[in-house]
Image (spheres, grey):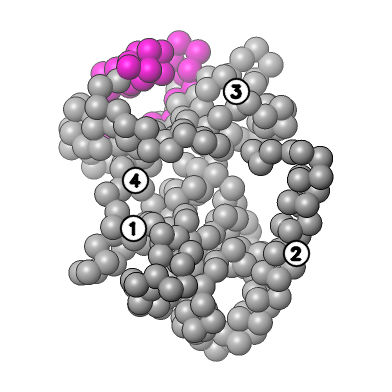
Amino acid sequence: MNLKNTSFISYQKDGINIVIRSDISERWLDNFINQFINMNSLDQAEVLYDKRNTITKIDDQILGKEIAVKEFHLEKTYDQLRFRLLPSKAERSLKIARALKEAGLKTPEPLAVIEKRGKTNELIFSYYLTDYVDYDFNMLDIAKDFEHPERYKIKELMPQLGKEVKRMHQANIVHNDLHAGNILVKDFETKPKLYYIDLNRGRIKDELSEKDKINDLKRLKFTDQEKKIFFKNYAPGNWKYYYQKVSEARQKRRKFVETKNKIRKFFGIQKG
């Protein structure tokens, strides 16, 4: 199936709420619901991740390409309560993905949100579907190791990353989980492409404050040299200010995380 139209339509089918690309056929939707959601037996499916959420790669014969399905786990009481009133993580992911694309940034091509709610508006299941990106590496694979033999790749990507995050913030988008693990790198050897993933915490605001920007940047963990290159491209005329403020915010965040982990350990609370 040749998909060209990137507009979306919303409707309900058999009690299931659907937001889907307008050029995807009902035949595909029926097949996905019947085989994957109802029976969990879709052919050519491979689970890539199964912890806080489940991510499955599917070689979709109808669409003629590989797609990724993110199923949001709904066990936490807090999530069940708040998502009765708020847009779901899948809905937020789609909204931010479309905003990123409009800003000229890359994220796996969104295809659909498929959800079902109960009588009190509780989420029964929630899926976010995108194209699968066959990436070269996740930036965290290298960034987490300062002595990695391919560390030079991170340094080479800093100018591009700085400019792209600047564009993201100029579009008044905050990712809210912007760390190296949520950046995929494709075609590094030719013309590198950065894909931003895990968008469900993202927000679009009327205008970003300096605090918004700094809080969004503080999760990026790189060497001092890499950070300087990043900030020189993120804010060429004011890079030292951001370098200092983000470093201070990272220190505060580190102390907060350490304190939180001590409290968790004391009370025997497992990480979610």
Which of disc 2 and disc 4 is earlier in sequence? 4
Disc 4 element: loop
Q: Is residue 226 above or below residue 116?
A: below
Picture coordinates of residue 253, whole percent (x, y): 71, 63
Looking at the rendered structure, the kind of residue marked 2 is Lys
Task: Tell me the residue that label 2 is attached to.
Answer: 255
Q: Decide if residue 42 is on the left or right side of residue 112.
A: left
Q: Quadrant of the C terminus?
A: top right
Q: Label 1: which residue?
A: 137
Please give the label number shown on residue 123: 3
Q: Is residue 19 magenta?
A: yes
Q: Can you tell which of label 3 and label 2 is closer to the viewer?
A: 2
Q: Position of residue 178 (x, y in %)?
A: 54, 59
Between 135 and 130, the residue placed more toward the observer is 135
Q: Position of residue 195 (x, y in %)?
A: 38, 56
Q: Which residue is mark 4?
A: 109
Which residue is at a point 64% across and 21% down the rendered structure image? 122
Q: Compute the Cα span from label 1 to label 4.
A: 18 Å
Q: Residue 136 in the image: x percent, y percent? A: 28, 57
Q: Secondary structure at mark 3?
A: strand
